[in-house]
Amino acid sequence: MSTWGSWALIVGVAVLVLVPSRAVLAGRQPGRFRYTQGPVRLLGAAGPAGYGAVPANEIPRLAGAPSGVRSTCAYIGLGLIAAAVALVVLYDVLAGRSRPDGR
């Protein structure tokens, strides 16, 4: 990926993921989550955790880091993605009991 493509990825994901996640963490709830009793802030925390994988993978490549540093950062990125998935699964388990249709 080119340098411009990497920066576009970092900025684009920041706008698309971090802005709504920060709004959820600040207490705003999207329309479809207003009537659930589930902890919506878990979804807000999953956004920055998932976004953290993007800079963890892209910044070492942009800086021209050695392959050992890049692979370590890639593992850190995978850990952040796993944490984001775990937060979404935890939300689904906790909100499942409070849904009106019982899903």
Image (cartoon, helix red, strand yellow):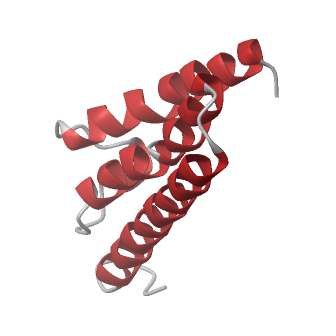
In the depicted view, which residue is nearer to us: 83 or 100? 83
Q: From the viewer's perspective, is residue 88 above or below residue 35?
A: below
In this rendering, would 48 be left or right of 98? right
Nearest the camera: 103 or 81? 81
Horizontal and vertical percent position of residue 36:
30, 65
Where is 18 relative to 80, above or below? above
Q: Nearer the viewer, residue 89 or 1?
A: 1
Counting the numbered discs, the total is 0
79 relative to 73, above or below: below
The image shows residue 2 at horizontal and vertical percentages of: 81, 20
Q: Residue at x 73, y 16 (%)?
A: 3
Side (left or right) of 22 relative to 72: left
Residue lying at 17% horizontally and 36% vertically, measured from the top left: 26
Q: Could you tell whether 52 is left or right of 37 in the image?
A: right
**Which residue sits furthest top?**
4
Q: Pick the quarter of the image with the N terminus.
A: top right
Query: Looking at the picture, how far across and down is residue 74, in whole percent?
Result: 58, 55
Q: In the image, is residue 52 above or below residue 86?
A: above
Residue at the (35%, 77%) spot, across then down:
90
Look at 63% across and 17% down and name the residue there: 7
Q: Residue furthest right?
A: 1
Furthest residue toward left: 27
Quarter occupied by residue 101 = bottom left
